[in-house]
């Protein structure tokens, strides 16, 4: 499985959720609504979820093992950091 595309949509409002991401796997399958969250120990991802009838949130799509979750998280966070850097550079250029 290869992650062939990552699309980052930054969240403008303040809060713990920093971005919403879509990833494409092998140019064939897309997973939308992966969230980039700022936690106590740094950034992490939360897979798309739905509120169940008991009030708990359950992932709709998720990796089966921790190695795959780590690989997905690493790629997403790298792309998020690039998006943050590009936005900062654009803001600096506009301020000049």
Image (cartoon, rainbow, N blue to C red):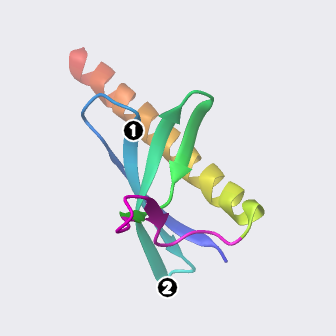
Q: Position of residue 45 (x, y in %)?
A: 53, 49
Dominant secondary-structure state across the stretch colored magenta: loop
Which part of the image, by quadrant, shows the N terminus? bottom right
Which part of the image, by quadrant, shows the C terminus? top left
Observer-nearest of 52 and 12:
52
Using the image, determine if residue 12 lies above or below residue 22: above
On screen, residue 83 versus residue 75, left or right, reads left
What are the residue bounds of the magenta stretch? 51-64
Mark in the foreground, 2 or 1: 1
53 in magenta: yes
Callout 1: helix, strand or loop? Answer: strand
Callout 2: helix, strand or loop? Answer: loop
Q: Position of residue 8 (x, y in %)?
A: 39, 52
Residue at the spot 39% in from the left edge and 38% down from the top edge: 18
Which residue lies under the disc numbered 2?
28
Which residue lies under the disc numbered 1?
18
């Amino acid at each position: 499985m290869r992650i062939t595309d990552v699309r980052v949509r930054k969240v403008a409002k303040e809060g713990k959720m920093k971005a919403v991401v879509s990833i494409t796997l092998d140019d064939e399958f897309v997973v939308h609504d992966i969230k980039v969250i700022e936690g106590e120990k740094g950034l992490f991802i939360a897979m798309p979820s739905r509120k169940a009838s008991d009030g708990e949130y359950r992932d709709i799509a998720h990796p089966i093992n921790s190695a795959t979750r780590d690989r997905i998280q690493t790629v997403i966070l790298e792309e998020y950091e690039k998006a943050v850097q590009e936005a900062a550079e654009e803001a600096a250029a506009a301020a000049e």
